[in-house]
Amino acid sequence: MPENKKPYTLAVDEKATPVMVYTLTSLSWGDLVTKELVRVRTWLRTTMAPLYLSLYEARVLPIGGAGAARPWILSEFHVPTSQVIAFHLLPPASELLEQDPEEPNRKAEPVTALVGLFRFDGLVRMAARSNLGTYVDITRETFIPLYEVEVSHPATPSLGTMRVPYALVRQEAALMAARS
């Protein structure tokens, strides 16, 4: 395969978006091919979410093993969406945020979401009269959106911290704590 040849060919109505996918056993990143009109950062919150996220030019870092692992390099990697515990665009990729920070009767509350071995410090948007306990009790969405997020892996500080404007965390996998 030539040096700059991609392992996929985009149709005229498709795009490739670099994303990061978290599971209980790995951290993966690569290009996700979708239709041009798909808002990738919110795709998993829709009824159009795929059964598998197919990453191209993927890097897969096993998590939780002994020692410092090196990522596997795979031309094509398919992750069952049911195993995704968190998801976000890989910086510097970006899409416009759909939320208006000045939306009436809404507030942004600082939270920490412990998702598998990862820590997501960010903001969750909720009703102005709500609190985190009520929010997690009544929310029925598969993925909770977080804003202005710092992602870390406390057991492996050498991975550093990544800052992203928006991330999704699987509600049933997230242990949520209020931050002050």
Image: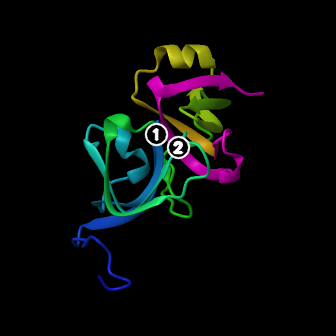
The amino acid type found where label 2 is placed reads Ile
Question: What is the CA distance from the residue labelled 1 to the residue labelled 2?
Answer: 5 Å
Which label is found at residue 63? 2
Say which element carries label 1: loop
Residue at the spot 63% in from the left edge and 44% down from the top edge: 149
> Foreground residue, 18 or 28?
28
43 vs 8, left or right, is right
Residue 129 seen in the figure: no
SS state under label 2: loop
Q: Residue furthest front?
A: 66
Numbered circles on residues, count:
2
Marker disc for residue 25: 1
Amino acid type at image mark 1: Thr
Where's residue 55, x and y in %?
A: 35, 57
Which residue sits at x=46%, y=39%?
25
Position of the N terminus by quadrant: bottom left
- Residue 127 — which label? none
Left or right: 161, with 73 as reference point: right
Give the residues in magenta: 151-180
